[in-house]
Structures are given as structure tokens and as C-alpha cells.
Image (cartoon, grey):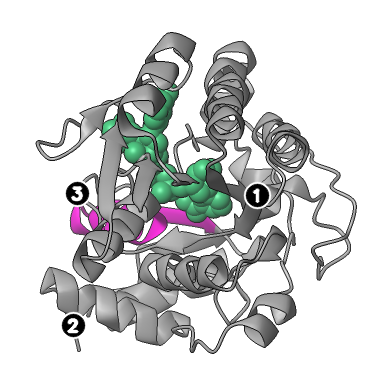
Amino acid sequence: MKQLVVGASGLLGGFIYRSLIHEGLDQIIGSYYGLAQPDMIPLAMEDQAAVDAVFAAVKPQIVYLVAAQPNVDWCEREPAAAYRINVGGTENVLRACARNKARVVFFSSDYVFRGDAPPYYEDDVPDPINVYGQHKVLCEQLVLSLCPGGLVVRTTGIYGSEARRKNFVYRVLDTIGRGEIVAVPHDQLGSPSYAPDIAQVVQQLLSMGASGIYHVVGPEMMDRYSFAMLIARVFGLPSQQIVALDTATLAQTAPRPLAPVLDGTKVRAACAFEFHTPAAGLKAMARLTGQLGA
Ligand SMILES: NC(=O)c1ccc[n+]([C@@H]2O[C@H](COP(=O)([O-])OP(=O)(O)OC[C@H]3O[C@@H](n4cnc5c(N)ncnc54)[C@H](OP(=O)(O)O)[C@@H]3O)[C@@H](O)[C@H]2O)c1
């Protein structure tokens, strides 16, 4: 069995790639975009010819389409460029999957919802309020129409160790480390999701032959400020620099859905898997990075 992880150099893609390699059962190929990795192949998914060439060479049977430009504010500022990558690039990979009859897992977001009527279930109608969310909705529709049997995994607030140190946990740690103020919204709710958990649950879903939409999210809902305070506590850092603001004051470029909370009942009923609570996930991450505090 050949499996291709498109976006294996990223946070979630890295955990998926490494867990597949660790299993050692199949032939695993990973791709990177800007962060060159010696064991992976380069791929810009908006380049259709390049995507087709990779599929012709690799002939994958399972494809994890983790790649995206997930910077929500950049997508809002550069909607055409974001579309080219996040929708056009996704479509290139999906069409190649369809031609090659490969099973595909696509990763979507809680930002497909408006966030004013939580919790959201898999069959609720998306109603995004920013460009990133609109593009994810288009991608979900493409998966379900082009790739019968495709799996759409909606997730949120992904954290875990990563070379680029760009997920929320590192932003909090590094901003505190520089002695600067960490301004975080107290009115944006989500369920922090530990990347290795998502990787494992996706494997279970695939082995069960699951298709359609699943919400794969951590077990506890919390606001961003509370999560930032928890990060400081687990990593043993002072929390005085963490300041709670409301979203309106923060004035982020892209409008943020305030409570796009994804209900995870469906995946918990399907998979025998214990998700890390945020405290347990942060402790596991801290142990991995050798930074465990008090
Ligand atoms: N992070 C979250 O909290 C969150 C929440 C909900 C949903 N999601 C979705 O989950 C997925 C994974 O998120 P993540 O945080 O792990 O993202 P990430 O760390 O930014 O990784 C993105 C991956 O996509 C690759 N990539 C970027 N542009 C590409 C292009 N034009 N062609 C091919 N590959 C490209 C990157 O390559 P390089 O690193 O080599 O440049 C990287 O491997 C994304 O689809 C994201 O939208 C994320």
C-alpha cells in the first residue's frame, strides 16, 4: 500500500507522516512546500502538472491532503492567492485522486461555521464569515463530489511540537519569552486539539472505512485566554504578560467566528480513543520538547 501525505512538513502533516512511518507497514511518501525536508519530495499543489507528475510517479492508494495556507488573516488580505492554493491546489490533488482511485482524507476547519449557534454537528449547514472558511467549504464540496468515499476531517486549534514554532502554544511561549504582552481573546471558543491525537484517530477512521464528514477535536471547550493561561502554567512560565481582550478590540484582519464549537460525538462513538485533555496534551508536548515547567 502506498500512502502520500501532501503537506508532511507541517504541524499536523508531520505527525501523520511520522506515525505512518513508525507503523512501518506501508510505503509512505511525504511532500513539503517551503520547508525543505531531506526525506520528502517538493510539491506546490497549485501546479497541476507537478501534482499529476507526483501521482504518476508515486501511484498512491491513500492520500492525506493536509496541505494549505492556514493563515486566516493572510487569506483575507490575499483572497486570490489564497484561492489559488487552498481551493485550486486542493482541486488539483482531488482530481488526481479521483483519476487514480485513491482514497483521500481532507482537513477542514471549524471556521466553516458562523459561530453564533454552537455546538455544530457534521450535518449542519456551513455559513463561513471569512475567506479561509469560505475556501474550506468549497474544498469540502469538491471532496464529496469528486472523490466518493472521501473523508473530510474538520478540526480546530491544533497544537503540538513543530519545527516552525508557529502554533498557538509556541506563540504564547515565545512572546512571554521575549518579555512582550500576549494579547488573546477571551471571547473566542474552541476545543484545543492535540495533533498526535488527530493523526491516530484518522488512522482508525480509515481502517474502519469511514467516509463523509467527521469532527475530530479535543475533549474540552475553552476560550483562548484560558488556554493561554494553561499553557503558561504547564510550561512553568509567568502569566502576568497574558492579557485578555475581546475580539472587537483585537481587530484581527479576518473576522473570527466566536464560538464555532464542533461537536465530537460522532467520532467518539466510532473510535475507541481517549483524546488528551488540553492539560494532558500540553504536558505531553512539554515532555517531548523538554520544557516541562512546575
Ligand atoms: N492549525 C489549526 O489550528 C487548524 C485548525 C483547523 C483546520 N486546520 C487545517 O488543517 C490542515 C493542517 O494545518 P497545520 O496547522 O498543520 O498547517 P501547517 O503547519 O501550516 O502545514 C501546512 C502544510 O502545507 C504545506 N503547503 C503550504 N502551501 C502549500 C502549497 N502551495 N502546496 C503544497 N503544500 C503546501 C506546508 O509546506 P511547508 O511547511 O513546507 O511550507 C505544510 O506542509 C490545514 O488544511 C489547515 O487548514 C488547521
Give the image quarter of residue 31: top left
The region drawn magenta spans: 167-184
Mark 2 is on which residue type? Gly
Q: Residue at x 15, y 36 (%)?
A: 37
In the rendered image, residue 162, in percent from the top left (x then y), is placed at 25, 54
Q: Mark 3: which amino acid?
A: Ala
Q: Secondary structure at mark 3?
A: loop
In primary-sequence order, the first of circles 2 and 3 is 3
Residue 181 seen in the figure = no
Tell whether 287 sits left or right of 76: left
Q: Quadrant of ligand 1?
A: top left
Closer to the chain start, of discs 1 and 3, is: 1
Please tell me how crowded label 3 is: few (under 14), some (14-19), or many (20+) other residues with Cα within 10 Å: few
Residue 123 point in image, percent of width and height = 86, 60
Give me the C-alpha separation between circle 1 and circle 2: 42 Å
The numbered dot on residue 150 is 1
> In the rendered structure, does residue 101 fall within the stretch colored magenta?
no
Mark 2 — residue? 293
- Disc 1 element: loop
Q: Tell whether label 2 touches label 1 (CB within 8 Å).
A: no
Quickly name the residue at label 3: 163
Which amino acid type corresponds to the residue marked 1 in the rendered image? Answer: Gly
In the picture, measured across the screen, residue 273 lies left or right of residue 126, that is left
